[in-house]
Amino acid sequence: MNAYKELEAHYQKIDDLRHIGAITGWDESAMMPAGGGAARSRAMATLNVLVHDLTVDPQISDWLMACENLELSPMQTANVAVIQREHRQAACLTSDFVRAQTEAVMASEQQWRISRAENDWATIQPHLERVVGLAREEAAMRADAGGLGLYDAMLELYEPGVTASQLDTLFEPLKTSLPPLTDAIIAHQANTPCLPLGDHFEVAAQRELGLSVMKTLGFDFNHGRLDTSHHPFCGGVAEDVRLTTRYSETDFLQSLFGVIHETGHAMYEQGRPKDWLTQPVSQALSMGTHESQSLLMEMQAGRSPAFMTFIAPKMRAAFGRAEDDPAWSVDNLYRQVTTVRRDFIRVDADEVTYPLHVILRYELEKALIDGSLTVADLPEAWHQKMTDYFGLSTAGNYKNGVMQDVHWPAGLIGYFPTYTLGALMAAQLFEAAKTSQPETLQQIETGDFTGLLSWLRQHVHNRGSAVSVDQLMTDATGLPLTTDAFLTHLHRRYLD
Ligand code: CO
């Protein structure tokens, strides 16, 4: 067996173990009784150690070196490049460091749950100081191994090939244009307030509606399923995608658009290159690309007037509302799903204000990593930026300010920007799909997503990790990623 075949076999084994981990992780969130928790944590930790040991196996370097002398196909070459990057990322941290970091993060996440509920910054601060200190060490080791800047080295874990300087260029026009745009939209929307939809929606009816929308979008139920969990997510593996939602009896739109979002993620997984599923080159290109597929379905297609025209009669039927009920008209339902407001919480934000939440976090975490901001000064810095970008004060309001997200207590630095990269990519990709298939919106209006899905399969899903984000965007849309399509979309949807 040549070195390349050895590598493939090795990564197939890693993929098999990750498969077990993904399904077990879904089970823990969606199915497992609480009493199974302790034993499951131990089993999963053991599995993670096995996977980690395989990814840092010293033989990998030898095989990679030997591959340089082999004649490989373009996909094989791309596979080797992804393996090279992932192996470098896994091998540059010592196992002592990984253990110390895992322990610090677990303690800090647990404390965060308590501290956030009690709006108590003082009890989380020392944990966060430890976790950020370790993240700075991690960034230094990663930067050294990859020849990258400190923040770039963290970003590379989620968004390979993208740098802080590219983010600065993309985020600047958003930072300047979104605050006045938000003002204009809020003033505009004040003219036509939303009519309330009622306050009780049967969970069984919500689930049926969710399943029928998944079918409409093109989710393959032979290779996936929908269940319920406390935090909605898309898990499992490409051949068996597990998505989850949660239901609120007072607000069905939250679950429905959550399902549409996760279905976008799920269809990306289901569309990964079929012949390469066990290999790293078939993986999603980046977290931003993943988010682009969920936001394309949720924000671009799902919240369009075309889709609301299709889904409004189904919503009325699901909850027994009359056709002439003005609250359940297409116009009012569309207003319901496109209301813009300035608020404290990122996860509840609309598509107009969301990037400002991300930019705020990006600027702060970059400063934490380069050492220009200390954890002690974080609440004040957060309050300052909330005041600048949103006109909202978070002085003393840690719960809805600096403590609202689990990312930093969990040691995730470099992750936030991927949400906005995804939103920008979604707008540019949807625009390109509509240009190449001008009938797209008419098709969506009749519940026909096959044209859109096949375009996404060809231009995004089937490419796996074989190209860079820049290359994927250029091939699919004719341009590298910019903010133009996103800003045009916002103007068109909210002000025209
Ligand atoms: Co998502």
Image (cartoon, grey):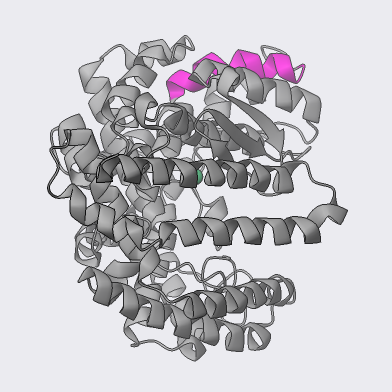
Say which of 50 and 342 sits in front.
Answer: 50
Say which of 402 and 97 sits in front.
Answer: 97
x, y (%) of residue 114?
Answer: 74, 74
Residue 254 seen in render: yes
x, y (%) of residue 311?
Answer: 57, 18
Relative vertical location of residue 477 with respect to residue 109 in this rendering, above or below: above
Q: How many marks on residues?
A: 0
Give the residue displayed 56% in from the left and 81% down from the top: 395
Give the residue displayed 53% in from the left and 41% down from the top: 16
Residue 489 seen in render: no
In the current view of this chain or complex, which residue is farthest to the front?
1
Relative vertical location of residue 110 with respect to residue 246 in this rendering, above or below: below
Picture quarter containing residue 223?
top right
Give the residue displayed 59% in from the left and 44% down from the top: 22
Quarter of the picture holding the N terminus: top left
Residue 312 highlighted magenta (yes or no)? yes
Give the residue displayed 49% in from the left and 86% down from the top: 375
Residue 280 highlighted magenta (yes or no)? no
x, y (%) of residue 409?
Answer: 57, 73
x, y (%) of residue 431?
Answer: 26, 29
Quarter of the picture holding the C terminus: top left
Which stretch appears magenta? 305-320
Picture quarter containing residue 202?
top right
